[in-house]
């Protein structure tokens, strides 16, 4: 936590001339804070309350956010902060993001919600060609760093093609934006606050399967977790596993099962996909000599490919087996075949074993 | 400028101060064109048209030399009076209806004639749709299907539009138009198969319930992303035109859908490509929790047609006879004149958005009740059919119990049917299985052999 505070101090000094209005950052130690058991949805909601409360120039908007949003993440915001700062938009994702860019470019924090990550594509042009290049193309005269785009992503068990996708890799191919995905309530709150206050446009994907399922003790205060810093969430010696978001819940179970079979896994939550923390992964792989990456998105062209390539470049001589990827299959997300499509625990466990026994 | 702002309301109430494009529109095109008497030679695509409009437009204060600017696309008159076109017309565009709320034929309506046989079929299908919705909704609540979405309150738009079309017309639906497919002969059993995602589902169990599609019935498969079907419909319509077919494309969207970029792309393309496409916008007041005031500030959808150079009409979407008449006529215009038509049907989403939604969280129950009871489209049409002596209580009882039985049977069969085979997961990604998918299928089968308990037992391998 103290790292975070230090880092944030640095970010504040980076805020551009148009800048943001005041932003607070906790100074106390996390251990002294009061904790509350929250699910991921409520943690996001708390972060949004804090963001709006601590910065009068912050706004929350998107389809159906006024009444609390289809996932209830924006509950209570309109009542507390008013319709001028928390509002429904017309059903138009390109409008939502374009509007957000303009709002952010005027020195505001624009927190846009895309109802499902599957519906972010009408806004692709605004994100890829506009938000990502706003600073660079103007020679840093303008920026839309106050923009944060939240979107629920990933499988839910019954979402079919258009309520299940994990489109993160498309955005990881775009210099100028950051892509962040939390794994738990505590992470969601701290990372979302960091994203909102980061001076760069960010796409924040929320694992919607965990909205209600994941419950964790979450500090009630305003706190932030650093971006572009991966976290070793489980130490191990035989193989490094890298993942993000909802997939980490599966991977944690895999670690427990592998341990029973005498394999010690080191599990890393990447958290920020771009710009990503290669050093943490590299250090781990240099120690274990093996790497497995797992994500829900189709394996071909997924972000696992980028991690694999980078680690092979950096750790070639230390690797004792090929890098393994256990990911979604190369099909559209299929409703009745979802259990087959998914990178399940046993698929990962099998791959761990063959990597270790290579 | 200041005078203009202060005097705004006064100016707007004077007819001669109507924005000139509206004034001229009223002169040129009577909004009450009788079916089959539409000016078929009318062409808005010639630049001389603009000139003719100007000559007729005496209301506009033109500058003293009566000069015009010869601008690409047609001549435009100069005026010395700085005046902004208002945000809306003095009165909202009226809503065409043929039956009043009691189901009585209104006086002097120019509706298209509907035979007894047609009327009875329309009514029966409306009841079928209603019954299917209430039973499938219950089945979802019992956890037997994963999702459902009803067309409650929009039965007339669904069925009457379908009835007015020919089976050759190509339908590109949003998702709240299963009645069109029902009308075309998709059976209750087929609906049930899709909702259960079993091996008989034409979509092979890949999509969520209600994402129907049937090539045989010229009904493109439903896709969840809103409004994507609209520009596609223009392409389909253009193909029909090029092939010299006597058919049009008909595409549906909601009021929410009209906000998407694709809606605007679709309308503009349709006008420019002179495509025989009918856009039917179901303005049902709500897009999930977003009311129309938060969706647009225009007078609904109908006025957007003119901005794109498209004929348009507003119709009472809860009046099956009016919907039938408007769609029938729009189809004639689209096909004969090779031009798009926009229909805005005013209706109401009586049900929740879907089984994932509780609409009492954001809208008054009174409002729902009013539309469910007083403005019920099925009851209204029933009264008219009954009054014509075409329908009685015995028919009603028979129909309802018959449909219920059919539905119960269909659900039983669909629930028991096997899931689609595993190979259907990999088929149809492309026309042929590429090597990456061949490999993935092989590996998956090995995994299943090793861990059979991880996988559903009802999917044939
Ligand atoms: C591109 C896109 N954005 C968001 C959604 C989520 N969504 C599903 S239905 C809906 C509302 C649609 O409203 P409307 O077009 O008025 O149709 P209605 O449901 O009222 O029939 C929304 C926002 C979606 N399906 N696609």
Image (spheres, coloured by chain):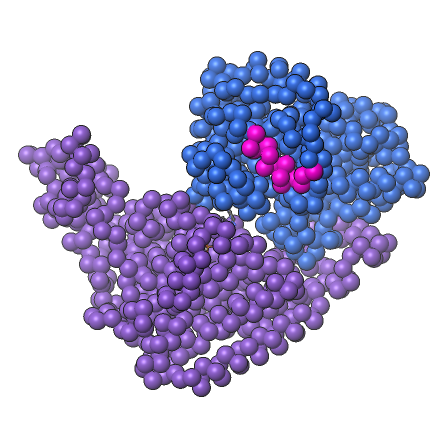
Q: Colour of chain A?
A: blue
Label total for image: 0
Q: Is residue A309 above or below residue B245?
A: above
- A49 inside magenta stretch: yes
Residue A319 or B351: which is nearer the viewer?
B351
In the image: residue B73, left or right of residue B232: left
Q: Quadrant of residue B202?
A: bottom right
Quarter holding the C terminus of chain A is top right
Measured as percent of width and height from the top left, residue A42 is found at 62, 39
- At a point 60% along the width and 69% down the height, the residue shown is B192
Quarter holding the N terminus of chain A is top right
Query: Can the viewer see residue A297 in this picture?
Result: no
Q: Report the residue that reaches farthest toward the bottom.
A: B394
- B275 inside magenta stretch: no
Measured as percent of width and height from the top left, residue B427 is found at 67, 57
Measured as percent of width and height from the top left, residue B316 is found at 33, 62
Magenta region, main secondary structure = helix
- At a point 51% along the width and 62% down the height, the residue shown is B150
- At a point 70% along the width and 71% down the height, the residue shown is B416
- At a point 55% along the width and 47% down the height, the residue shown is A70
For the magenta stretch, what is the residue range?
A37-50
Q: Report the residue that reaches farthest toward the left.
A: B64
Measured as percent of width and height from the top left, residue A163 is found at 60, 49
Q: Colour of chain B?
A: purple
């Amino acid at each position: 936590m103290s790292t975070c505070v230090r880092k944030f101090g640095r970010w504040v000094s980076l805020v551009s001339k148009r800048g943001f209005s005041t932003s607070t950052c906790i100074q106390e130690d996390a251990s002294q804070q009061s904790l509350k058991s929250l699910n991921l949805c409520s943690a996001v909601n708390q972060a949004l309350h804090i963001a709006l409360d601590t910065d009068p120039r912050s706004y929350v908007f998107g389809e159906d956010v006024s009444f609390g949003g289809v996932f209830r993440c924006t509950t209570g915001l309109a009542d507390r902060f008013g319709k001028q700062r928390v509002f429904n938009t017309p059903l138009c994702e390109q409008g939502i993001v374009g509007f957000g860019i303009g709002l952010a470019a005027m020195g505001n924090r624009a927190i846009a919600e895309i109802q499902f990550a599957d519906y972010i594509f009408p806004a692709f042009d605004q994100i890829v060609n506009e938000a990502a290049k706003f600073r660079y193309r103007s020679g840093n005269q303008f920026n839309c760093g106050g923009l944060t785009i939240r979107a629920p992503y990933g499988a839910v068990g019954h979402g079919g093609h258009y309520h299940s996708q994990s489109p993160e890799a498309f955005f990881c191919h775009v210099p100028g934006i950051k892509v962040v995905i939390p794994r738990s309530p505590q992470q969601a709150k701290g990372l979302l606050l960091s994203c909102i206050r980061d001076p760069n446009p960010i796409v924040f994907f929320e694992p919607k399967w965990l909205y209600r399922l994941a419950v964790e003790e979450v500090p009630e205060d305003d706190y932030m977790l650093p971006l572009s810093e991966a976290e070793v969430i489980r130490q191990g010696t035989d193989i490094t596993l890298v993942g993000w978001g909802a997939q980490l819940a599966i991977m944690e179970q895999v670690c427990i099962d592998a341990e029973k079979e005498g394999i010690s896994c080191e599990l890393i939550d990447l958290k920020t996909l771009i710009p990503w923390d290669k050093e943490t992964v590299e250090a781990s792989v240099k120690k274990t000599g093996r790497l497995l990456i797992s994500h829900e998105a189709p394996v071909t062209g997924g972000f696992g490919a980028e991690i694999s390539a980078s680690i092979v470049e950096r750790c070639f001589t230390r690797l004792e087996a090929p890098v393994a990827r256990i990911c979604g299959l190369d099909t559209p997300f299929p409703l009745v075949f979802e259990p087959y499509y998914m990178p399940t625990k046993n698929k990962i466990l099998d791959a761990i074993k063959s990597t270790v026994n290579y | 400028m200041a005078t203009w702002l202060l005097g705004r309301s006064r100016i707007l109430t004077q007819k001669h101060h109507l924005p000139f494009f509206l004034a001229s529109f009223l002169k040129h095109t009577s909004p009450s064109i009788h079916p089959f008497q539409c000016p078929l030679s009318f062409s808005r695509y010639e630049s001389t048209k603009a000139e003719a409009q100007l000559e007729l437009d005496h209301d506009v204060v033109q500058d003293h030399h009566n000069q015009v600017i010869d601008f690409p696309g047609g001549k435009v008159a100069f005026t010395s009076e700085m005046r902004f076109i208002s945000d809306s017309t003095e009165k909202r565009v009226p809503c065409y209806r043929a039956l009043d709320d009691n189901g009585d034929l209104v006086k002097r309506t120019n509706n298209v004639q509907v035979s007894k046989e047609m009327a009875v079929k329309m009514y029966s299908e409306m009841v079928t749709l209603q019954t299917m919705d209430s039973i499938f909704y219950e089945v979802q609540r019992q956890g037997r299907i994963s999702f459902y979405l009803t067309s409650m309150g929009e039965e007339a738009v669904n069925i009457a539009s379908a009835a007015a079309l020919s089976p050759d017309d190509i339908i590109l639906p949003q998702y709240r138009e299963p009645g069109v497919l029902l009308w075309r002969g998709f059976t209750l059993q087929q609906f049930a198969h899709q909702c259960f995602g079993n091996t008989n589902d034409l979509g092979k169990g890949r999509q969520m319930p209600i994402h129907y599609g049937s090539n045989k019935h010229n009904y493109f498969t439903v896709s969840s992303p809103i409004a994507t079907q609209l520009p596609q419909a223009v392409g389909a319509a253009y193909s029909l035109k090029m092939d010299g077919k006597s058919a049009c494309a008909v595409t549906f969207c909601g009021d929410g859908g009209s906000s998407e970029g694709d809606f605007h792309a679709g309308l503009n393309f349709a006008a420019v490509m002179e495509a025989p496409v009918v856009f039917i916008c179901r303005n049902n007041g709500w897009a999930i929790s977003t009311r129309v005031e938060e969706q647009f500030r225009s007078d609904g959808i109908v006025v957007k047609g003119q901005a794109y150079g498209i004929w348009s009409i507003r119709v009472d979407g809860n009046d099956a006879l009016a919907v039938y008449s408007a769609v029938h006529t729009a189809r004639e215009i689209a096909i004969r004149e090779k031009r798009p038509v926009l229909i805005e049907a005013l209706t109401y989403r009586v049900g929740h958005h879907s089984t994932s939604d509780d609409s009492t969280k954001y809208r008054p129950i009174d409002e729902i009740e009013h539309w469910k009871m007083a403005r019920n489209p099925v009851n209204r049409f029933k009264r008219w059919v009954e009054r014509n002596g075409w329908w009685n209580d015995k028919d009603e009882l028979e129909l309802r119990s018959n449909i219920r039985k059919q539905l119960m049977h269909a659900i039983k069969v669909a629930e028991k049917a096997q899931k689609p085979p595993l190979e259907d997961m990999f088929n149809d990604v492309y026309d042929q299985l590429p090597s990456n998918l061949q490999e993935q299928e092989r590996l998956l089968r090995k995994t299943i052999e090793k861990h059979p308990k991880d996988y559903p037992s009802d999917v044939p391998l």
